[in-house]
């Protein structure tokens, strides 16, 4: 085990401690760059290959010009949504469905796991990745997330803290092979009776081992300085006549390592090595067999094993876990290749046996129609707080502008003022708030959906600032929308903008309140953990908050479709009023759903 690496120890349900190596900021940044490049390539291919194929398909269809424009519009709107899905959902979906790994993490042998070492679910993946909005502010450099990783003992960025996850390094195959080869060679050495002599104390050996493990990564000048220092320090123990200085150091290390693992007593030795080697000698064959079995399970998949194979794998896992517990006890807290090797072997099997079951269609449906409404009802207080943070400043701004219309200059930008001037003309001509042709309606809808989700994710993620960021997002959005509506009121074209907002406004605003409520749940974990630890509070409130976020995304998708296809239409006031009432009835009915649906899931 590299003493310069950071490690975390977790306890399995079998009460066995597993040691994981924490991924550093360098490897995580490298993985993020690989994933970023993959996303860029995916988006490029989506628009060049996918867009070209869609355009070619539309041209081949023998339709009128108007119908072709509509088809092309829907095609481009789908491309916009898919692009947003790739950029926004890449990390969430891959980590949630690929046992905590994106492609970049898999290449660099990194994995996201729960604090207890178990595989993460889509819920934890969503929480940690949505919070990238805060971790990676100001957007150019991941300053906040980077500092959090460096400062945290477990290498956690803010998203990991809330989600209850850690990013670990998986031991390279060649390291595992080398470690196990050393275990095997140790057993053979004991059997043959060969016992090299030990010359170093434990502290001296640790110093020498540190150099050996790090020498390949050192520059030539620094490596030569180390060789000079070690040669001076151990001059009476190095065989410099038979070897060069560098080779003599390696020879001393190998001789000392074999001596210690052969059970030779050394100064300050507390017999832990003797006890450990006795366990290694008697159990190593089982570890080798289990390692081979584990490789087979990884290739075949646990779900593809028959009952007897699963039972045998589980029995062997428990036996090897017991061996690890005995070895850790015998080692008395000392690190060794044997402990590290066996710990990683057990950890790898542990992640397979405790892997989360795949989500069934029934579970997905019940999450949408039962879990989300239930959480909305349960979280009525933070949602109400979010609503107040939005509505109170909005109402105050509206009143202030109506009292003195010149105050609108402080809140309303030039773009909205020009639109209002155009709105006066449009009202006289009997037109609506905006004119959206058949070609641009689907594109507008997809643009609205992606923008609303982005803003909502920011409100949600800002909860990590103890709710201050969430409050600011709600207040500024409330003031912005209210000032625009008030400005239209002062120009006597209030009905123009209200008729546009009415069809989608109820769903869209409530979705904003849900994301704000989710942000305040995260804030509550910081400010009011109550009887729970702050860590446990983060995990529990984070799961609740991401359920609210999922509900908000669902409502915003519906609102975006309405805003792009219904809101711009010049309908009679009664029609749009009844449509708005219908969305309110739908929303209330959805929130009040309190029954799970039973669906028979069938294997494909």
Image (spheres, rainbow, N blue to C red):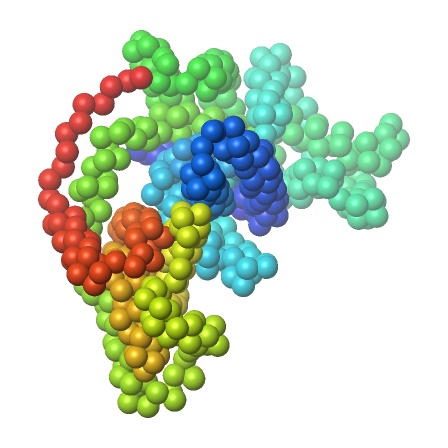
Q: Quadrant of the C terminus?
A: top left
172 sits left or right of 314 in the view: right
**Of 286 and 573, the residue lying toward us:** 573
**Of 35 and 476, the residue lying toward us:** 476
Q: Residue at x 20, y 37 (%)?
A: 366
- Residue 227 appears in which quarter of the rendering? top right
- Residue 145 location (% of width, % of height): 51, 57
**Of 328 and 541, the residue lying toward us:** 541
Question: Can residue 325 be seen by looking at this rendering?
Answer: no
278, above or below 108, in the image = above
Q: How many marks?
A: 0
- Residue 431 location (% of width, % of height): 34, 64
Q: Quadrant of the N terminus?
A: top right
- Residue 572 location (% of width, % of height): 22, 60
Q: Residue at x 50, y 50 (%)?
A: 155
- Residue 549 location (% of width, % of height): 31, 52
518, above or below 349, in the image = below
- Residue 479 appears in which quarter of the rendering? bottom left
Question: Can residue 459 be seen by looking at this rendering?
Answer: yes
Q: Residue at x 25, y 58 (%)?
A: 571
**Of 437 and 78, the residue lying toward us:** 437
Q: Residue at x 54, y 63 (%)?
A: 138
């Amino acid at each position: 085990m590299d003493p310069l690496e950071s490690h975390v120890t977790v306890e399995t349900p079998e009460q066995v401690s597993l040691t994981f190596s924490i991924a550093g900021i360098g490897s995580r940044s490298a993985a993020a760059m690989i994933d970023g490049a993959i996303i860029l390539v995916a988006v490029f291919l989506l628009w060049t290959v996918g867009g070209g194929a869609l355009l070619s398909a539309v041209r081949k269809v023998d339709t009128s010009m108007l119908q072709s424009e509509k088809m092309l519009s829907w095609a481009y709107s789908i491309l916009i949504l898919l692009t947003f899905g790739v950029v926004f959902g890449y990390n969430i979906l891959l980590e949630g469905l690929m046992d905590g790994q994106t492609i970049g993490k898999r290449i660099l042998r990194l994995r996201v796991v729960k604090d207890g070492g178990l595989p993460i679910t889509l819920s934890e993946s969503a929480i940690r990745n949505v919070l990238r909005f805060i971790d990676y502010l100001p957007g150019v450099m991941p300053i906040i997330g980077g500092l959090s990783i460096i400062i945290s003992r477990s290498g956690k960025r803010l998203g990991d803290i809330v989600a209850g996850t850690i990013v670990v390094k998986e031991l390279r195959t060649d390291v595992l092979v080398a470690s196990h080869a050393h275990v095997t060679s140790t057993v053979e050495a004991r059997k043959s009776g060969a016992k090299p002599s030990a010359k170093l104390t434990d502290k001296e050996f640790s110093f020498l081992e540190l150099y050996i493990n790090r020498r390949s990564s050192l520059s030539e000048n620094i490596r030569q300085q180390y060789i000079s220092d070690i040669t001076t320090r151990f001059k009476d123990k190095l065989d410099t006549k038979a070897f060069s200085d560098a080779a003599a150091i390696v020879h001393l290390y190998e001789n000392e390592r074999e001596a210690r693992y052969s059970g030779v007593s050394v100064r300050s030795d507390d017999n832990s090595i003797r006890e450990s080697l006795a366990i290694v000698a008697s159990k190593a064959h089982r570890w080798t067999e289990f390692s081979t079995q584990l490789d087979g399970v990884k290739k075949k998949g646990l779900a593809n094993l028959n009952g007897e194979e699963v039972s045998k794998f589980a029995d062997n896992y428990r036996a090897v876990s017991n061996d690890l517990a005995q070895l850790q006890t015998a080692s008395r807290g000392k690190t060794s290749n044997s402990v590290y090797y066996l710990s990683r072997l057990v950890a790898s099997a542990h992640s397979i046996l405790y892997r989360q079951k795949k989500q069934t269609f029934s579970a997905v449906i019940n999450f949408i129609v039962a879990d989300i409404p239930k959480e909305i009802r349960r979280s009525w207080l933070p949602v109400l707080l979010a609503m107040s943070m939005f509505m109170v400043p909005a109402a105050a701004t509206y009143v202030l502008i109506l009292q003195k219309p010149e105050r609108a200059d402080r809140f309303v930008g030039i773009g909205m003022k020009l639109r209002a001037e155009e709105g006066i003309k449009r009202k006289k001509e009997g037109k609506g708030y905006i004119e959206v042709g058949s070609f641009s309606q689907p594109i507008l809808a997809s643009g609205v959906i992606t923008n609303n989700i982005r803003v909502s994710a920011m409100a949600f993620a800002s909860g990590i600032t103890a709710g201050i960021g969430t409050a600011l997002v709600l207040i500024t959005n409330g003031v912005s929308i209210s000032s625009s509506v008030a400005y239209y009121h002062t120009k006597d074209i209030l009905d123009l903008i209200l008729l546009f907002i009415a069809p989608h406004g109820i769903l869209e605003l409530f979705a904003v309140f849900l994301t704000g409520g989710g942000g305040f749940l995260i804030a509550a974990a910081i400010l009011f953990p109550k009887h729970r630890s702050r860590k446990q509070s983060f995990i529990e409130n984070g799961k609740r908050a991401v359920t609210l976020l999922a509900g908000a995304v669902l409502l915003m998708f519906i609102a975006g479709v309405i805003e792009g296809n219904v809101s711009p239409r010049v309908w009679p006031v009664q029609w749009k009023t009844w449509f708005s009432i219908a969305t309110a009835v739908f929303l209330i009915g959805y929130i009040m759903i309190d029954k799970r649906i039973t669906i028979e899931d069938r294997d494909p």
